[in-house]
Image (tube, rainbow, N blue to C red):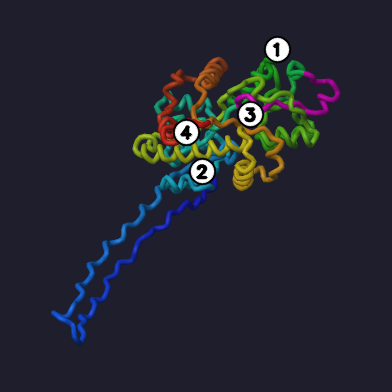
Amino acid sequence: MRRWLCALTLALAGLAGCTPTPTTPTGGPGASGPAASSAPTPPLAAPTAVPAPVPVRVGLMFSASDAGVLIALEQGHFQEQGLQVELEGFGAAAQMLGALGAAQIDVGGTAVTPGYLNAFARGVRLRIVADKGNTAPGWGYQGFVIRRALWDSGAVRSPADLRGRKVAVPSVGSTAEIGLDRALRLGGISSRDVDLTQLPFPDMPAAFAGGALDGAITIEPYLTRMEADGVAIVWKREDEYYPNHQIAVLYYSEPFATERAEIARRFMVANLQGVRKYNDAFRKGDAARRAEVVAVLVKHTPVKDPALYERMLMPGLNPDGKVDVASLQQDYEWWLAHGYQEERVTITDLIDHSFVRYAQQQLGPYR
């Protein structure tokens, strides 16, 4: 893991106190009455320093769905809230959730996992506080791909033809496997009917090019890049076979949500300001805003080619911050049915929308 401070430093401001030199009494010829004199001016009040910004530790995977935090950082919204955000990169959900559970970070953005649900059932409290990536219609940034050679030869024309073939997800038991199962069921089979393998998203293009994979669930920019490179075709995107799938969420550690609740509310205000600018760019089609947002994403994410943002489908980010509870409930039931979920929980107990409600009160509804 790598840590660095994203400097959002508020300058300390103050006036230097000074005491003017008393004026020498004066008088002149012909002056009547006593000579005039000036009384010493009282010293100015001691300068009042601006409070130092409050540090907030945030874990990210530096994907496009982190746009809310990244835009708020680059455009000074955390600074406006008196916060100094410290970013830490993570490569896996389990690592980030462990750091949140230990209160090593205050905020984290990643997927919901059965491991998290099992830990919650055993008393490890992490709060789901906001949306951080969904597949609302038109926002199909995750999808199902098939190796191009199989498609062109006619060997695979639908998910049914993948029975027994090698199909990849980034991690078994993840929301990606749930998406895979949804896609395969359109062909009358399930994730249990394929040779399921675990492979990180960045390794998938080479595996398709070498013939080692027949299908996969992957995300942008790999969907667009693999199709452009001719190694795979995008069969369907997830907003088609699992619309409104709540893929990722924003978490607060329990100490951050309770002991530092005022700071947590201010963080959410800034985050939603960033999310709304993202929606201005990609939902409303504001060209100037889009250029600003793309510049932020190019700086902080692995997708460094600005032209790709004109071709990719982006993650859905709810401009009012709420998570899709029905989607989380469906995923939970799937995990139970497939043996990934060991203990039962009540999904609504995991979610605390009070922070996004506060932010909405400050910002008003998104229009």
Q: Is residue 199 among the parts visible in the rendering? A: no
Q: Position of residue 47 (x, y in %)?
A: 31, 61
Q: Decide which of tag 1 and tag 4 comes sooner along the chain.
A: 1
User: Separation of disc 2 and disc 1 at Cα?
Assistant: 44 Å
Q: Amino acid at mark 3?
A: Trp
Q: Which residue is mark 3?
A: 139
Mark 1, secondary structure of its residue = loop
Q: Nearer the viewer, residue 276 or 123?
A: 276
Task: Identify residue for label 2.
Answer: 72
Amino acid beneath label 1: Gly
Identify the amino acid type marked 4: Tyr
Disc 3 secondary structure class: loop
| Residue at image mark 4 | 251
Q: Which residue is pictured at 70% across the width and 45% down the height?
A: 305
Residue for badge 1: 188
**Mark 1 vs mark 4, CA separation in Å:** 36 Å
